[in-house]
Every structure is written in C-alpha cells, then in structure tokens.
Amino acid sequence: MAYPLFEGKNHASVYQKYRFTPPDEVKNIILQYLDKKKGQPHVLAVDLGCGTGQNSRILAPHFQEVVGMDISECQLEEARAVPGYPNITYRKGTAEELPFQDGSVDLLTAASAAHWFDQSRFLAEASRVLKPRGCMALLGYSDPNTRLRYQGCGERLNHICAEVREVLMPYTNNQVSVAEGKLEELFTAIPFTDKERIERIKVNSSISVRNLVGFIESWSMFQGYKKKDPQAAEELLLNTQKRFLEEMGVKSADTEIKQELEYFCVLASKPQ
Ligand SMILES: C[S@@+](CC[C@H](N)C(=O)[O-])C[C@H]1O[C@@H](n2cnc3c(N)ncnc32)[C@H](O)[C@@H]1O
C-alpha cells in the first residue's frame, strides 16, 4: 500500500525549503561502509523516497550515476529544479518495484523514507537489484529526541515542540512510529547476515526560528491537520513561532537556535 501524503505542490515546496540535508557524519558512515564491504568503483546509487532530493545530491559527487525515485511527481519536480547535478536523474516509481536489472546497483539509500515502504516487497526488490556486496543504507532522525538550546531556555523550547507534536498526534500516520522505532522490525527482516543498526548518531547544528517552524510545516501530520482545518493549522504555526520568540526574548525569526539531532542508520550488505 502506498501512502500519498507528499503529493501536494505546496507541500513539496515546503519540503525543498525546510527539510534537512543528511549531515557529513552520516554520509561518511555510509560511504565508509560501502568502501569496506564492496569497494570501488561506485557506479550507481539509487535514492528511494528521494523527495526533493536532499540525500540524492550529497551522493552525487561519489557515484558515476545517482537515480532519485519517489512516488510523488510534485516532489520530483522540485528536485529536478535544483541545478548543477548532471549525474542525477529523478524518476517516478515505487521502492517496491524497482526499474533496475538484477545485480546492477552499488548502493540503495532511503532517507526518512523507508518507514513508508511495504517492507517485504521492498526487501525482495533490494535483494534483487543490489550487486553482490552492494549495500543498503536506511537513515533517518528521531524528531522526539531532537534537543534545542538557546541560552537558558532550551528545555522550554523542547516543551513547545512536544506540545505541537501532541496537537498533531491525531493526524499522525502509524508508519511514523516505525521511523521513531528506528526501523527495528525492518532491520530484523533484512535477509542478509551482514547488517548493523546504528541507533544514535548525535549531530549538532543550528537552525533559525523561521526554519524550525518551516520544518514543522513539512511534517506529514501537519499537512493532515492543514487539510482538515487550514485556519487552525496556520494559527498553530504562527502561535508556535510567537511562543519560541517570547521564550527566547528576541524579536527576529532569523535568530539561530542550537539543535542536536539524533540520526539512526540501518546498514546491510548483500552476500557475494
Ligand atoms: C519523509 S519524505 C523524505 C524525503 C527525503 N528523502 C528527505 O530526506 O527529506 C518521504 C518520501 O518518500 C516518498 N515515498 C513514500 N512511499 C514511497 C514508496 N513506496 N516508494 C517510493 N517513495 C515513497 C514520499 O513521496 C516522500 O517524498
């Protein structure tokens, strides 16, 4: 079953603006794993559920060819509009039916996306298309474990985020809890013996209040709320921004907050 929760044009442009690019810490873990298990050359990487292409773009310098795939044409349109990546092609399609020959892919990735896939059909396809010793890397981050810091009021900012999640709870698809469980069940089901799940990769960065509110706007549950009650959803965003600024004692939404994200990564390599 596909979840058409990322189809809207406006949602796709919010995605392009506000979603996080996977950090170097995670990218390096994946590339080092591929080097160790399969080695060079790195010919073809396929990024499943690529959305607006953040993860596809960081792979581009390391592969001869990258294919980003997604079920949402609007997301792909945004991805294609980013110039400067001649070795990336974006194709509409599902993770459960991959348009690649048997044993042709060096690396399969899914960034914040594998929880939406039909587990057994995706794994069957991944096993088919990967080269011997080719790898899959399923990464993401745990929103509830994100920690914000701004002078003395970090905990109060975290509390505001938790309250927003609470409001959006009724609009949260069950699959989101699969991501929050860091893909444990999917990891267990991977039919390769060579696999590992890294549960906590802490990454520090900073984010402006404006971008943090934009990130909340990108959540599928926020979009569900907006569909049901556009005005209440708009007010939630405005009110959240106002509360952040008040707690921080600042006026500008460009003020930066320190952010610690907790990434996870499932890695697996196909047998020889
Ligand atoms: C949370 S977004 C992540 C997008 C991007 N990888 C990122 O890191 O921001 C999940 C994406 O997976 C796509 N998707 C959902 N189910 C899919 C499936 N079965 N096959 C391919 N893509 C899928 C959605 O359309 C959406 O763009």
Image (cartoon, rainbow, N blue to C red):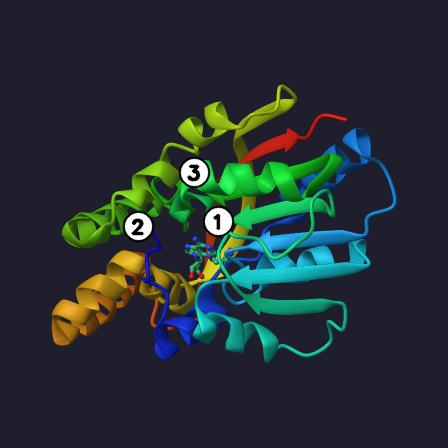
Is the residue at mark 1 in contact range of ligand 1, meaning its CB lies under 8 Å from it? yes
Label 3 to label 2: alpha-carbon separation: 35 Å
Task: Give above or below for 242 relative to 266.
Answer: below
Q: Earlier in the sequence, mark 3 or mark 1?
A: 1
Crowd rating for badge 3 (residues with CA inside 10 Å; few <14, some 14–19, many 20+): some
Left of 24 or right of it: where is 231? Answer: left
How far across and how far down the image is residue 128, in percent?
63, 40
How far across and how far down the image is residue 102, in percent?
69, 45
Give the residue displayed 32% in from the left and 65% down from the top: 217
**Whereabouts is ligand 1, in terms of quadrant?**
bottom left
Left of 81 or right of it: where is 5? Answer: left
Give the residue displayed 35% in from the left and 55% down from the top: 2
Task: Give above or below for 97 relative to 15.
Answer: above
- Residue assigned mark 3: 119
The quadrant where residue 180 appears: top left
Crowd rating for badge 2 (residues with CA inside 10 Å; few <14, some 14–19, many 20+): many
How far across and how far down the image is residue 269, in percent?
68, 30
Q: Amino acid at mark 3?
A: Gln
Q: Secondary structure at mark 3?
A: helix
Q: Amino acid at mark 1?
A: Glu
Q: Earlier in the sequence, mark 3 or mark 2?
A: 3
Residue 96's label in the rendered image is 1
- Residue assigned mark 2: 157
Q: Evaluate whether residue 261 shows in this view.
A: no
